[in-house]
Image (cartoon, grey):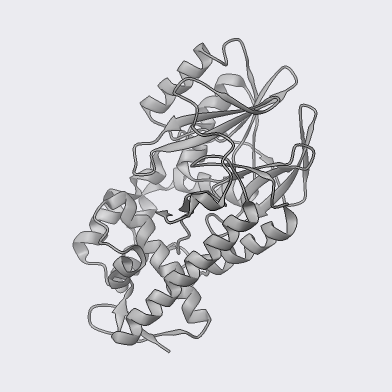
Amino acid sequence: MSTHAMPQTLDFPYAAPPKPGAVVEVRPGVFWARLALPFRLDHINLYLIEDGPGLALVDTGIDNAPSRAAWEALFDGPLKGRRLTRLIATHFHPDHIGLAGWLCERFDMPLAMSQTEYLLALNIRLDPSALKSEPYRGFYRSHGLSEESTEILLGHGLQYLRMVAPPPKTFQRLAADDSVTIGGRRFEVLTSGGHSPEHVMLYSAQDNLVLAGDQILAKISPNVSVEAMEPDGDPLGVYLRSLEKMKARLPEDVLVLPGHNLPFVGLHTRADELIAHHEARCMALVEACRASPQTAAELVPVIFGRPIDDPHQLVFAFGEALAHINTMIRAGRLRVGSAERGLALEAA
C-alpha cells in the first residue's frame, strides 16, 4: 500500500480515530474501534453493529498477543456485558480474519464471508510451507530477485500470512447481491476483486453507508498484487473495473467506513484519484522500459520511488509491480524478453 492521496479532496467526518480500548459511534448503533498492527500500516479499523441482543462484528485484527489484549480491553470497557452475535470478514488477509477462530469460539457465533476468501484462509492455514516450495521460489527468482532477497521474502515477509488463529471449520457464505439484515438494518452484499479475489462490502441505503474493508481507502492505495499461484493474473485490471462498478452502484455522498485510515465522504472522487494513480504508475513503467529493458525487481523502485528493504513491504511491493506489468502486457504496452538476470520487460 502506498500513500498518495490529496485528502483535501475528501470530507472526513471524524477528525481522529478511537483511542485504544474505546469506540466511536458513527451512526446510531454502528460503532468504530481500532486495533494496532506491528507493520508500517500500523492499524486496522473494526466495526460493530447493533444486532438484537448483541453486536455483529466486521473484521478482527491479526492473531498476536497485543491484539488479544486489545480485545480484552474492549470487553472490559465499552463492550462490557455485550456479546458478539456474528462475525463478518471482508476478506482473508490476516489483519481482517486473524482472530476469527478465537472470537467465534469464545462467543459461539458464526463466521460469514465469501466462499473464495474462506477457502484461501483455510489453504494458507493448512499448508503453510507451500509458499516456500517450487514453483513459487522460481517465480520470484525468474523476475530478477536475488537469491538473498527471495529467501528474505519467503522466510520473513510471508510470516504475515501466518498470523491467523485456526479458522472456524464452517462458515456462512456471502455472495454478490445477497441481502443481510443486521438488527433493523438491511445491507446489500457487494463483492469486488483486485486487492483480494472476492472481497465483501456491505452497503446500507437506509443509512447511506458502506463498510468497504480495504477496497477503497482515503489516503493510501490498497495493495493490488500478482501472486505466485497465478503468475499471469491481472488483479490491477480487476481492481480498476471494480472501482468503476462502485461509482455506478454507490452514491458520491455515501459514508465510507474503511479498513484503514479515517472514514470519509467522496467515494467517486477517491475512486477517480486511485484510477489516475495507477495509470501514472503504468506510464512510469513504460518510460523506464523504453530507456532500457528492466526486470520486475528493477521496476519496484520505479513504482515506489525508493528501494524496498523491509521484508514485509517487499512482499507487497514486488507483487504490486508485477500487477502493473501484467496490465501493461495485456494492453500491448510492454512485452516480455529474456535476459540472464531474469525475464526482462521492454516497451512495446
Q: Position of residue 46 (x, y in %)?
A: 55, 33
Query: Residue at image x 75%, y 37%?
Result: 207
Q: Quadrant of residue 282?
A: bottom left
Q: Is residue 60 left or right of residue 321?
A: right
Residue 54 drawn above or below residue 233: above
Q: Position of residue 332 (x, y in %)?
A: 50, 86
Residue 310 in sight: yes
Query: Residue at image x 52%, y 56%?
Result: 195
Check the image and name the residue furthest to the bottom. 348
Check the image and name the residue furthest to the front. 8
Q: Is residue 261 left or right of residue 170?
A: left
Q: Nearer the viewer, residue 50 or 174?
A: 50
Q: Position of residue 219 (x, y in %)?
A: 47, 49
Query: Residue at image x 72%, y 17%?
Result: 53
Q: If the image is split into quadrants, where does the C terminus sit? A: bottom left
Residue 94 drawn above or below residue 151: above
